[in-house]
Amino acid sequence: MRRSIRVGQVEVEQTALPGIGLRHDFTTRKGQRVGVVSHRTGRRDLVIYDANDPDAVCHTVKLNDEEADALAELLGAPRIVQRLNQLHQQVEGLVSVQLPIPAGSPYAGRPMGDARVRTRTSASIVAVVRSGQVFASPGPDFVFAVGDVVVVVGSEDSTSEVAGILVNG
């Protein structure tokens, strides 16, 4: 089964691969066809199609979970910062702050969901930076560590409340 979805400004073709997983393909502005095969096992394959035959793959890069995560971080981290900056320009009153998880934080070593930041403040945690690695859109099971830098988006008041929560509980 094949269907088209929009990811930002790009038209992406999604194809079910029975017994394998999903394939997502798109064509760049320069006409190069690129895809990602997401196997049911969790493996990801980055594929580049032959320019003369859009159905023929000329290069495949097989990525394990760590490699796929690293590639996503490399491609995604600068885009997150760019999108936040664009939002600041478009939405008055929206701020983003970077808050460290200090030693002694009641949430160090605990899942992000335990802090209930969004429920308590209406602010959102959009990323966590740990040792130079960016974890974009972390889920509630993401475990905070001392020294993490939490990127929070919200109003000035709500982001201040998050700072208090991360320090005092």
Image (cartoon, rainbow, N blue to C red):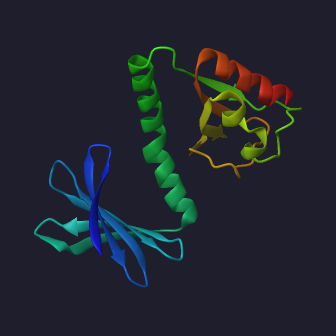
Viewport quadrant of the C terminus = top right
- The location of residue 152, given as percent across then percent down, is 61, 29
Residue sticking out furthest to the bottom = 19
Residue 10 lies, with reference to residue 45, above or below; the image says above
- The location of residue 141, given as percent across then percent down, is 71, 52
**60 to the left or right of 118:** left
- The location of residue 55, given as percent across then percent down, is 19, 74
Residue sticking out furthest to the left = 52
Residue 164 lies, with reference to residue 68, above or below; the image says above
Viewport quadrant of the N terminus = bottom left
Q: Nearer the viewer, residue 39 or 73?
A: 39
**41 to the left or right of 168:** left
Residue at image location 85% in from the left, 33% down from the top: 105
Residue at image location 32% in from the left, 67% down from the top: 47
Residue 48 lies, with reference to residue 135, above or below; the image says below
- The image quadrant of residue 18 is bottom left
Residue sticking out furthest to the right = 104
Residue at image location 75% in from the left, 48% down from the top: 143
- The image quadrant of residue 44 is bottom left
- The location of residue 160, given as percent across then percent down, is 70, 18
Q: Nearer the viewer, residue 28 or 169?
A: 169
Q: Nearer the viewer, residue 132 or 113?
A: 113
Number of disc labels: 0
Residue at image location 34% in from the left, 71% down from the top: 60
